[in-house]
Amino acid sequence: MALTGCQTKNSSSGNGGGNGGGTGSASGGGGPAAGKIVIMVGGAAKVIYMPAKLTEQLGYFKDEGLNVELQDTPAGVTAETQLLAGQAQGVVGFYDHTIDIQAKDSSKCLESVVQFANVPGEVEVVSKKNQGTIKSPSDFKGKKLGVTSQGSSTDFLTQYLAGKGGVSTSQYTTVKAGADATFIGALTSGGIDAGMTTDPTVARLTKTGQGSVLLDMRTAAGTQKALGGLYPASSLYMSCDWVNANKPTVQKLANAFVKTLKFINSNSADTIASKMPADYAGGDKQLYVKAINDSKGMFTGDGVMDEGGAKNVLTVLGSFSGNVKPKKDQIDLSKTYTTEFVKAAK
């Protein structure tokens, strides 16, 4: 399945008229272009980040008078770097990056302003060859485990699951397997024995029998079983300074994204798929519809962060992360997300 949508810059059809277009870098300085809002997406074709492109496709950015440019990047950690460098005003990625960055440097502040999902939407998939030998994370010892990239949220979750199973990071090999076709190639060629990925990659691997689901974090029940509670993940996060300096624009972004979340919750997977770019289906529309249907339940209907879930993310990261563990008690969760804008959304 060649899922190549958003591989290059994708500008919305909005013209940024009026005072809707915010400017400025992540720290509030001069932005890439006057009136343009650049949002990095940590894998635009992934269903977990579907609200970004779907909002553009539905014209909701334009309705708010916003000029938004979505830029695809293969991994969330790369998107975070771009944001901190002032190359973007927002990131559609995992909420856990906001906690990780505070632990690394307390002078830096990132916050989720719209929470798309309170579960990861990630799946640990085992290759056909290893289905009989990897039956739980305790079997990760000596295995090659695929993640999007080192330092990514899939890497965080893999470390936690392995540790919970009694396997240290030195007892397995972390492999940068990317996503989509790259991940599939790594799993089927033996480059990895198992790995963490999302739909629609999961749908393809299970359809062909090349992979089977070991841990399913697309649902609240599956997430609680794997991680001990909810784990808010897919979100729009931004620099706290930029948010404070551009509140009217952030409100318009929240309006657009909350409208999209309501659309997802009130429409069928088939209807949603029909609104997405045709190439996202990779030549198999029905499989793409299945992928959306298998994951759409993860999305919130209002963009509001689950407070207990946010605490659980800190608990998970604080159990293994070299950055977070020694500073767990110093992390101020109130600086990592806000519900101000989604609660005021139209």
Image: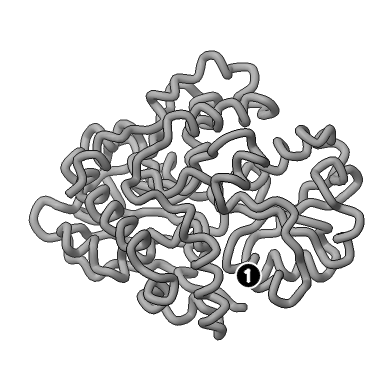
Snapshot quadrant of residue 179: bottom right
Whether residue 148 can be seen here: no
Residue 158: horizontal and vertical position, in percent? 71, 43
Residue 51 in view: yes
**Coordinates of residue 163 in the picture (x, y in percent):** 77, 33
Whether residue 223 sits left or right of residue 132 in the image: it is left
How many dots with numbers?
Answer: 1
Residue at 76% from the left image edge and 33% from the top image edge: 164
Residue appearing at x 50%, y 75% in the figure: 289
Q: Residue drawn at (24%, 32%), measured in percent from left and top?
A: 244
Q: Is residue 320 left or right of residue 259?
A: right
- Rendering coords of residue 300 (x, y %): 39, 49
Q: Nearer the viewer, residue 345 or 6?
A: 345
Q: Residue furthest front?
A: 221
Residue 133 drawn above or below residue 323? below
Q: Which residue is at the far bottom?
A: 283
The structure's colour scheme is one colour
Residue shown at the point (49%, 49%) measured from the top left: 79
Note whether 323 is above or below 3 in the view shown. above
Name the spot of residue 283 as percent of width and height, x first: 55, 85
Q: Nearer the viewer, residue 257 or 239?
A: 257
Binning the other alpha carbons within 10 Å of mark 1 as few (below 14), some (14 to 19) or many (20 upward) gives: many
Give the residue type at disc 1.
Ala
Give the left or right position of residue 4, taking residue 196 as reference: left
| Residue of label 1 | 203
The N terminus sits in image quarter: bottom right
Horizontal side, residue 200 vs residue 341: left or right: right
Element type where label 1 sits in the image: helix
Q: Kindly give the residue lying farthest to the left in the view shown.
A: 18
